[in-house]
Structure formats: structure tokens, C-alpha cells
Amino acid sequence: MYYSFIMLKPDALKRHLVEQIMQYFKKEGIEIERLGFKKVDEQLIDVHYAHVIEKYGDVFRSRLMDYFNGQDTIPMILKSGKESLVADIRRIVGATDPSKADHGTIRGDLGDDSFDRCASENRSCYNLIHASDSFENAKEETAVWFGKEVSEQYFGK
Ligand code: GDP
């Protein structure tokens, strides 16, 4: 069995899209292994988004905090028997900018935001879901959201 990490962002919960989003994975034989419910704080966002905060800077960080801090999210470990799991999940999720995401993807079908709109409104882009882009990052992100012990259980030491 192969495992990867996703996190449903605050807009997915506020818009009551959790079940609808999970149908996209179920349809392709990808199942939930572990599900959490997490009200996020600044520290968690700083760690999880360290790479983009470093790349885009302080304004980007403060927009991320407005989007996430104190909000509810659902981190999950997903599983399937296919080695292509990480790529399969990313394909099902679609492009980062929902307005550019293909029809049939989660962000393309359910997303209601665009990079252009969020830039003009000085805020983060509401794109529903995060998905790890490698098994290595899935391991790290699982440790951040579920703890090191859980991460080692699925991804090894
Ligand atoms: P993802 O893996 O598709 O979520 O994309 P990244 O890991 O590159 O970026 C993490 C998150 O930062 C994305 O989900 C977006 O919320 C945000 N982000 C990344 N690049 C941009 C950008 O160019 N503009 C805006 N508004 N947000 C961005």
C-alpha cells in the first residue's frame, strides 16, 4: 500500500464541500487511511508553508495567516495500491490557480477563485485543498500535522 498527505483548507469546510471533494478520490480507488480535525495556529502555517513563505515573503505570509489562522482544516492520509499515488492525487486536485484548473479536477469543478482576483483583493487564493507533491514531502507534512510517530508508521524512519 502507498500513502500520501492532503489537507482540506478552510474554504472547503466553510463551503461544506468535504464529502464532494472526497468523492473525487473514492472514484479512483483512493481511500482515507487517517483523518484529523485541526484548528490551525500561526506556528503550524509557518512550518507547513515555510517554502512558499521564503519564496514570496512577508505579505504572502500575512495573507496566509488571514486565510488559515484560527480556522478549521482536515488533514488526511490517503492510500492506494498504486505507486503513482502522489501524482494521481495531484492530477485529481488540479492546477494551483482554480481558474486555470481543468474540468473534472477538484479545483476546476469546485474552485471559485483565481490568482487574479485574490491579487486584486490582497488575499490568499482559496483553492480548497493542499496535496503533497512527493512521498518525501508527504512524510514531512504528515509529521507536521499528525506527529512524527504517525509519519514513521506510514513512511518509515
Ligand atoms: P500547490 O501545491 O498546488 O498547493 O501549490 P504550491 O505548493 O506551489 O503553493 C502553496 C500554496 O500557496 C498554494 O496552494 C496557493 O494557495 C499559494 N500560492 C502559490 N503560488 C501562488 C501564486 O502565485 N499566487 C497566489 N495568490 N497564491 C499562490
Image (cartoon, grey):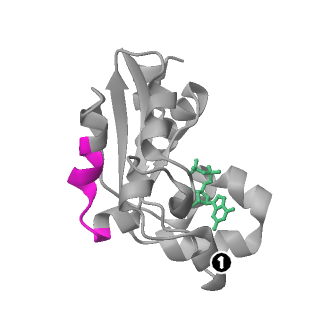
Q: Judge whether residue 76 can be spotted in this image.
A: yes
Q: Estimate the x, y position of residue 4 in percent, counting from the top left.
A: 44, 30
**Horizontal side of residue 62 vs 91, given as left or right:** right
Residue that sits furthest to the left in the current view = 19
Residues drawn in magenta: 14-23
Label 1 near ligand 1 (CB < 8 Å)? yes
Q: Which residue carries the number 1 mark?
A: 119
Q: Residue at x 60, y 85 (%)?
A: 121
Q: Is residue 16 magenta-colored? A: yes
**In the depicted structure, whether residue 112 falls above or below residue 105:** below
What amino acid is at disc 1?
Ala
Image location (x, y in percent) of residue 138: 52, 33
Q: Quadrant of the C terminus?
A: top right
* Residue at x 51% of width, y 29% of height: 87
- Quarter of the image where ligand 1 sits: bottom right
Question: Residue 14 appears in which quarter of the rendering?
Answer: bottom left
The secondary structure that most of the magenta stretch takes on is helix
Q: Is residue 147 visible?
A: no
Q: Is residue 67 above or below residue 53?
A: below
Q: Residues within 10 Å of mark 1 (few under 14, many from 20)?
A: few
Q: Residue at x 36, y 35 (%)?
A: 77
